[in-house]
Image (tube, rainbow, N blue to C red):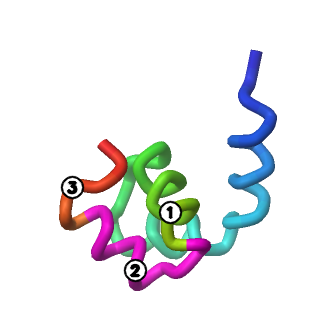
């Protein structure tokens, strides 16, 4: 059964997820966790990911 909250976040951060994918960040789960933690801020999400967050 899919996680409804995760689906909601995927819709909320759809554009940001596409941006991260376009920059080469291909781990969708990590990207979504980063965006949730940073309230959708792409630059902060990149820093979060590069510092090992969301793994």
Which image quarter is the C terminus in? Answer: top left
Residue at image x 53%, y 65%?
A: 35
Gap in angstroms between the C-alphas marked 3 and 2:
13 Å
Which residue is label 1 attached to? 37
Q: Which residues are magenta?
A: 39-49
Measured as percent of width and height from the top left, residue 45 is found at 41, 72
Q: Nearer the viewer, residue 32 or 26?
A: 32
| SS at circle 1 | helix
| SS at circle 2 | helix
Q: Is residue 1 above or below residue 8?
A: above
- Label 3–label 2 contact, CB within 8 A: no
Gap in angstroms between the C-alphas marked 1 and 2:
9 Å
| SS at circle 3 | loop
Majority secondary structure in the magenta region: helix
Which residue is label 2 attached to? 44
State left or right for residue 8 relative to residue 47: right
Residue 22 belongs to the span the image colors magenta = no
Measured as percent of width and height from the top left, residue 10 is found at 70, 53
Residue at image x 69%, y 42%?
A: 6
Q: Is residue 42 above or below residue 12?
A: below
């Amino acid at each position: 059964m899919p996680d409804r909250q995760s689906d909601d976040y995927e819709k909320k951060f759809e554009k940001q997820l596409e941006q991260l994918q376009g920059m080469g960040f291909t781990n969708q789960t990590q990207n979504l966790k980063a965006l949730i933690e940073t309230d959708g801020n792409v630059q902060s999400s990149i820093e979060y990911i590069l510092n090992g967050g969301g793994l």
